[in-house]
Image: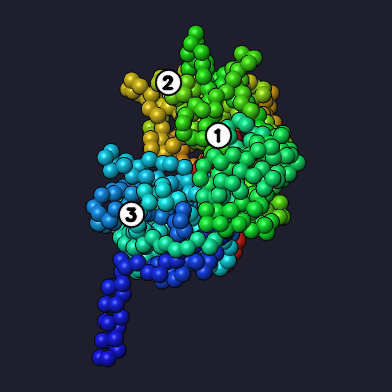
Amino acid sequence: MKRTATLITALLGLALLAGTALAEGFGTPTMDGVVDGVYGVAEASDPAGDHWASNNNIDLIDLYVCNDNTYWYFLVTVNDNLSATQWGKYMLYIDTSNDLNGATSDAWGRNVTVSDPHKPEFSLNSWTDSQPYGPEDTQFWAWDQGTSTWSQSGGADGAALSAGAVSGIEWKIAKSRLGNPASIYCEVWTTGGGGTDNAQDTSNDLPDDWNAADWSTPAVLSNSTLVAEQTGGDTTPPTVAGYSFPYDAYDRLICSFSEPVDTLSAETATNYTVTGVNVVSAVMSGASSVELTLDAVPALGSCIDLTAINVKDLAGNVIVNDGVTNVASFYLTELLVRGQMSIHLQTHSLAPVADTFAIEGSLAPLTWNPTCDDLMADPDGDSTYEATLITAVNCGVVTHISDTVNIEYKFTHQCTEWESSGNHIYQLDMHAPYDTLAIWWNDQAPINFTTLPIDVIFFAENVSNYQWDPLIDTIGIDGSIAPLNWNNPPVNLLADDGVLPDSVAGDGVFTTRLTFPTGSLKNFDFKYLWKGVGDTLFNFECFGQGNRNVFLNDTLFSSAVPIVLDKAYWDRCTQFVGIDDASPVTPAAMRLLQNAPNPFNPRTAIEFELPSRTTVDLAVFDAAGRRIRTLVKGTLDGGAYTGSRAVIWDGTNDAGRAVSSGVYFYRLRSDAKSVTRKMVLVR
């Protein structure tokens, strides 16, 4: 009885504590994903192991919050090494008004709601699958109460990720972006990699964790962690927070500091050095930023150090000349973008009105908003529009270690029409001083088109319950590229007449040979059509099953050496060509089959066999061994996962973004065995 009373007292104490500000600290932590002493104790703690069971690496533990005179800082610890797994999405909700006003929906459209009265006015959305992790992997959203809509405004002002068995994600956000509130209510919550996942774990106490019975049921967050703004004497010296360049002016460099700085010391040009060039002048461009004029553009393709010394903050604290906190390092690469727009302009040109193309993107100087601020030119009049950009990317401090950087971008036409495909992704080598990116509208790059005509021989047979009469029935074929189209009746017909390529008349196997001309899109979809006795129109096969697919490999095939497809069975489009859909037989051992088609763009089927019910993990990895997409993770029954049961990969990562062309590996791992195979994505 005494133990029960003690437990009840403890629970009542926790209940009274919920919603009460704890001992958050005042000061400026180092942005490295590690809990600094300035954070004090955790604002909220969550038990390990209470997350959604199928996602072990998004188990939140502690939430820490602190502030200085300029920024709020948030750090959440995760019961996994996110630097290694690189998986999951992490959201920060902030309520600044402590009332019923605020977001009634999630900025990314997940099935998530917030209980009254702490509906958020702001949301920081973050993902960890494009490391090295930084502010570019975040989105800052603000809620408009009047229009009941979210709008995005850049990302976090700083972001970092630490490694370890327990890792940390850290963000900083300027107080002014939140309206300088005296206190906030906040909540960190996490989801899986999918675009429709709702909340799966939170940084709050156990009752606020994922509480939906399934994905269609809303997850309700409380957003109830109260944090009061702290004040105090400023004893923290400023640091160099970053760099930027005025648009298209790379002989001027903006040095950003972690807090407002003293004008006299900040505008002393001799307080700055930039590798390989001279600093001519220094002029304040904001309370915490200084624009430096250089006597030349810094060297391309090599690591440049921007170093500040003797600069003071408003309290007189002098920046520490330690070679780390007073340095920002970056590479500059000149990128020539050549957009081949001729195919698009064949049907979309506004001539005689001048056509206008622009490039939008994720890496400065590119932006997503405003539209059309990076215009392209067509000096030769050949429908190839060009833009020259100089990109700047961190190369690290002291060690000067760099990696390739992904640029996410998209073209616009007439400043209103966007490409219909997903965003392009280009991998930029920052060690190269110059690079050229050549791409066609809608990601239809030259590599996606054939350089010679190719013949394809098609075979179709009825093995279903349809009553075919080879002497009366008519079989057609439609598809996405010429000479195919999606017309009904079809232009192209198949025959069962014993005339080549058909071998035997009247055997129920219909055939045709089609020539796909030079410049055909290599990857195309098709379907068979059938017109039986009494039909007035042709019937498309496989409603709701998707289309069949062919890859025109112009390295191996031509008109003289045609692609001869395996016999396809009517109305079975979910299986890839040549795979029979007979009753599955339990295999004797686990097998991972080669994907088909291979190479592919953008989708491929992965087939495997399991001898018995077991826990499996089927995932895709890039050439560096990083997991980019989890396809299956759970328990499956024994049997053949082939044909219509095959797993389809659509060429996207766990964040739903299209990955670039290249070599990828897919691995099937069970309780007792692991098998890996290679595949090639060609966009």
Closest to the observer, 345 or 131:
131
Give the mark nearer the N terminus: 2 vs 3: 3
The kind of residue tagged 1 is Leu
- The image quarter containing residue 190 is bottom left
Residue 165 image position (x, y, % from top left): 56, 68
Q: Secondary structure at mark 1?
A: loop
Nearer to us of marks 1 and 3 is 3
The kind of residue tagged 2 is Asn
The kind of residue tagged 3 is Asp
Instruction: Characterize the local packing of mark 3: few (<14), some (14-19) or many (20 or more) Cα atoms within 10 angstroms.
Output: many
Furthest residue in direction top, as rendered: 352
Q: Where is mark 1, residue-wise?
A: 366
Instruction: Assess whether mark 3 and mark 1 are in contact (beta carbons under 8 angstroms).
Output: no
Instruction: Assess whether mark 3 and mark 2 are in contact (beta carbons under 8 angstroms).
Output: no
- Residue 247 appears in the rendering: yes
User: Which of the labelled discs sits on residue 95, or is there none?
Assistant: 3
Rounded to the nearest angstrom, the CA distance separating label 1 from label 2 is 41 Å
Q: Where is mark 2, residue-wise?
A: 487
